[in-house]
Amino acid sequence: QVQLVESGGGLVQAGGSLRLSCAASGSIYSINNMRWYRQAPWNQREFVALISRGGSTNYATSVKGRFTISRDNAKNTVYLQMNSLKAEDTAVYYCNAAAVNPTGRNLDLWGQGTLVTISS
C-alpha cells in the first residue's frame, strides 16, 4: 500500500511557527513534484507550495516569504516550515506527490491532511 502520512499540525498563536512533515511509504520507484495544499472551512482547496525533485520551489503569493518547502529524497519526505503564522493560515494541510511505482505506473498520492489552527 503506497501512502502519504502527514504530521506536525496543531494549535499555535499568531506569529508562531510550525513544521509539517509528509512521508511517502510503500512500493515507490521515484517521486517527482511534491506539493502542499490547504483547505480552510467553507473554502476550496488551494495550492500552497511546490518542490521539484531537483529542489526548485514555487509558492502561493499569500505564503511567500513566510513558508519554506523542502524535501529529503532519501526519505521520500517533504516538509513545510511555516513562520509568522496568521489566523488566515488556519486550515487542513494536505501533501501531494507525483510518484512512479516500480512498474512505471504514475501515481497521484494524497495525504490524509493535518489540521493547523492559528489563534489570534
Image (cartoon, rainbow, N blue to C red):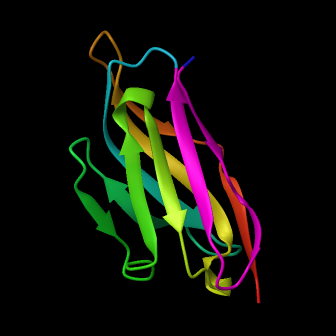
Q: Is residue 21 magenta?
A: yes
Residue 1, compared with residue 61, is above or below; it is: above
The residues colored magenta run: 2-25
Q: Is residue 106 magenta?
A: no
Q: Is residue 75 above or below residue 49?
A: above
Where residue 119 sits, quadrant-wise, is bottom right
Percent x, y of residue 62:
44, 82
Residue 80 location (% of width, % of height): 50, 58
Can you say whether 46 is above or below 56 in the image? Answer: below
Q: Quadrant of the N terminus?
A: top right
Residue 104 or residue 120, whichever sits in front? 120
Residue 102 spot, x, y in % from top left: 33, 11
Q: Could you say which is closer to the camera, residue 82 or residue 61?
A: 82
- Which residue is outermost to the bottom? 120
Q: Is residue 45 visible?
A: no
**Number of numbered discs present?**
0
Residue drawn where x is 39% and y is 63% of the image: 49
Q: On the rendered image, what quadrant is the C terminus found in?
A: bottom right
Tell me if residue 87 comes above or below residue 35 in the rendering.
below
Q: Nearer the viewer, residue 15 or 109?
A: 15
x and y percent of residue 71 in the render?
39, 45
